[in-house]
Image (cartoon, rainbow, N blue to C red):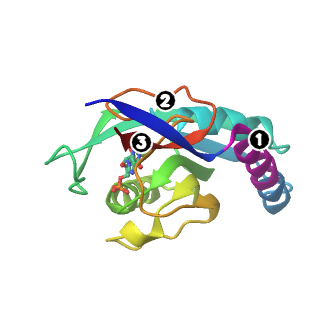
Amino acid sequence: MAEHIEVMLTEEEVDARIREIGEQISRDYEGRSIHMICVLKGGSFFMTELAKRITVPVSLDFMSVSSYGGSTKSSGVVKIVKDLDEPLEGKNVLVVEDIVDSGRTLSYLLDMLWDRGPEDVKLCTLLDKPDRRVIDVNVDYTCFRIPDEFVVGYGLDYAQKYRNLPYIGVVRFD
Ligand code: IMP
Ligand code: MG
């Protein structure tokens, strides 16, 4: 099946909003440092752009998870494919995600991170699809709330394609 991508948020809109959220985070964390955790692979583009806009000291770590169960619907039971390199004791953790959808993955992940003894855990997401929420998750920073559409670009994929698009688009099947 052929497909094409329809632009939802332009590169300029995304970049401007990341700059804004970066400034807000820098103000909120004044006098503290932030330990940013990127959830691979989708969060990687957002994480690097956001980190560049934060003015307090930042350290980075990466984690890769996959959900057990069906391939199209996340089950909420998360398997760690790549764990963090650093312990979290006493750190101000900021989890950076590409998108919060059902909330299943995040809710499981946040509980697991809290169990490692951080000072604090907050969540920052590029996109939020609130209409799709099944499990309540507290999102501290959201760049864009979007309608229930399957989106790609800026790290998000469709069958591993389109992660490198510099904008957010909707997949349309011709
Ligand atoms: P959930 O919140 O546990 O349902 O899972 C969210 C994960 O599903 C995200 O981290 C993405 O990897 C994936 N996902 C959800 N919606 C989309 C989308 O519109 N495009 C690409 N991936 C998505
Ligand atoms: Mg993801």
User: In the figure, residue 107 lies in which quadrant?
Assistant: bottom left
Quarter of the figure that contains the N terminus: top left
Residue identified by numbered label 3: 171
Residue identified by numbered label 2: 163
- Name the amino acid type tagged 1: Glu
Q: Does the image show residue 114?
A: yes
Q: Nearer the viewer, residue 28 or 104?
A: 104
Residue identified by numbered label 1: 12
Question: Closer to the N terminus: mark 1 or mark 2?
Answer: 1
- Across and down, in percent, residue 9 comes to 64, 48
> Viewer-nearest of labels 3 and 1?
3
In terms of secondary structure, where does tag 1 sit? helix
User: In the figure, residue 58 lies in which quadrant?
Assistant: top right
State yes or no: Cβ of the residue under disc 2 lies below 8 Å from any atom of ligand 1. Answer: no
> Viewer-nearest of labels 1 and 2?
1
User: In the figure, residue 104 lies in which quadrant?
Assistant: bottom left
| Residue located at (40% from left, 50% from top) | 150
Quarter of the figure that contains the C terminus: top left
Q: Is residue 38 above or below residue 110?
A: above
User: Which region shows up in magenta?
Assistant: 10-22
Circle on res. 173: none
- Across and down, in percent, residue 73 comes to 22, 53
Q: CA distance from mark 3 to mark 1?
A: 20 Å
Q: Is residue 91 above or below residue 136?
A: above
Check contact, mark 3 vs mark 2: CB within 8 A. Answer: no
| Residue located at (79% from left, 57% from top) | 29
Residue 86 is covered by the magenta coloring: no
In terms of secondary structure, where does tag 3 sit? strand
